[in-house]
Amino acid sequence: HLKGKTAIITGSNSGIGLGVARELARAGADVVLNSFTDRDEDHALAQEIAEEHGVAARYIAADLSDGAAARGLIEAAGRCDILVNNAGIQHVAPIEEFPAAKWDAIIAINLSSAFHTTAVALPMMRKAGWGRVINIASAHGLTASPYKGAYVAAKHGIVGFTKVTALETAREPITANAICPGYVLTPLVEAQIPDTMQKYGMERDEVIEKVMLERQPSKEFATTEQLGGTCAFLCSDAAAQITGTTISVDGGWTAL
Ligand code: NAD
């Protein structure tokens, strides 16, 4: 149902972003992949998606910690019907030990980059007469955990920014929503395991069951395919009146 649409997915050479790119391509969209690296394997991912789904797929490198580069990504793509702001990083530390540079990087990548990409993408959507903005927030956009100050602040921030985007486009065939995943086993989550093991003095399996999935009542990780499917749904006609809200894909986390 997305034939002829161009989707730009930030931070999509891995994890959820890559899963979203694959699902939108499966639905017929041309896709633009992105991360800050510019390796052969990044471009090969786009090639693989193009061949598998018979769509146009490109990889455009841009470091989204830089606002001008975030704007440049959308400009370089030239067209944006579907914008998925997904790029994100994490750092876990108590507030008094939280490195200021990490705070700034998390706010820049997880929050400010979405402002910059949205600012350039909205005029393109208006010109095309249709658009979808999908921000990948988190259960941490709705609730908090200790030691994730910057991440929780950025994710709450993007939920608010999503509502503003929806209100500014409310009279147009454009919607803006945030998806709030619980734990998805991706490289970002994998990278948190050693720190968390140390912090709580636990083994890997214990960290997964007692810390990560402690608040996920389903006791299962969500998958990147499920996140991609949720994005595809938000791009469907059935979702045309869904705007300015959050959709949790969290195994019941936020019901607790
Ligand atoms: P990931 O580390 O696999 O993917 C993050 C992506 O962002 C990668 O492609 C990475 O290259 C890219 N990225 C990082 N810094 C960048 C920069 N400066 N410029 C451009 N791209 C950059 O992690 P993921 O788990 O797939 O996370 C994707 C999004 O989903 C993040 O916003 C994350 O906060 C959110 N999320 C993840 C989970 C989870 O459990 N995995 C849960 C809730 C929300």
Image (tube, grey):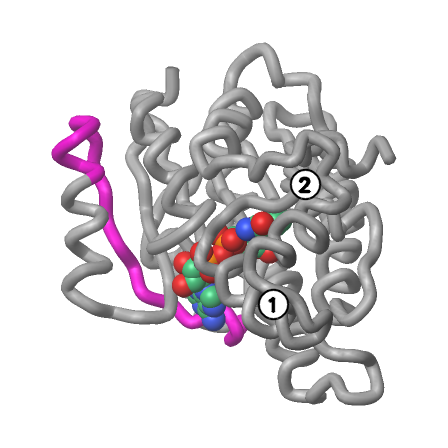
User: Quick check: 199 above or below 8?
Assistant: below
Using the rendered image of the protein, determine whether residue 107 is visible from the camera's viewpoint. Answer: no
Using the rendered image of the protein, determine whether residue 132 is visible from the camera's viewpoint. Answer: yes
Compare marks 2 and 1 and give the one earlier in the sequence.
Answer: 1
Query: Relative to the observer, which residue lies in front, 89 or 170?
Result: 89
Q: Which residues are magenta?
A: 49-67
Query: Could you tell whether 191 is left or right of 100 in the image?
Result: left
Q: Quadrant of the C terminus?
A: top right
Query: Could you tell whether 147 is left or right of 5 in the image?
Result: right
Three-letter amino acid code of the residue under disc 1: Gln
Tag 2–tag 1 contact (CB < 8 Å): no
User: Quick check: 232 above or below 70?
Assistant: above
Residue 113 position, x and y percent, is 57, 63
Residue receiving disc 2:
180
Label 2 residue near ligand 1, CB within 8 Å:
yes
> Cα distance, mark 2 to mark 1?
15 Å
Residue 90's disc is: 1
Q: Residue at x 53, y 20 (%)?
A: 233
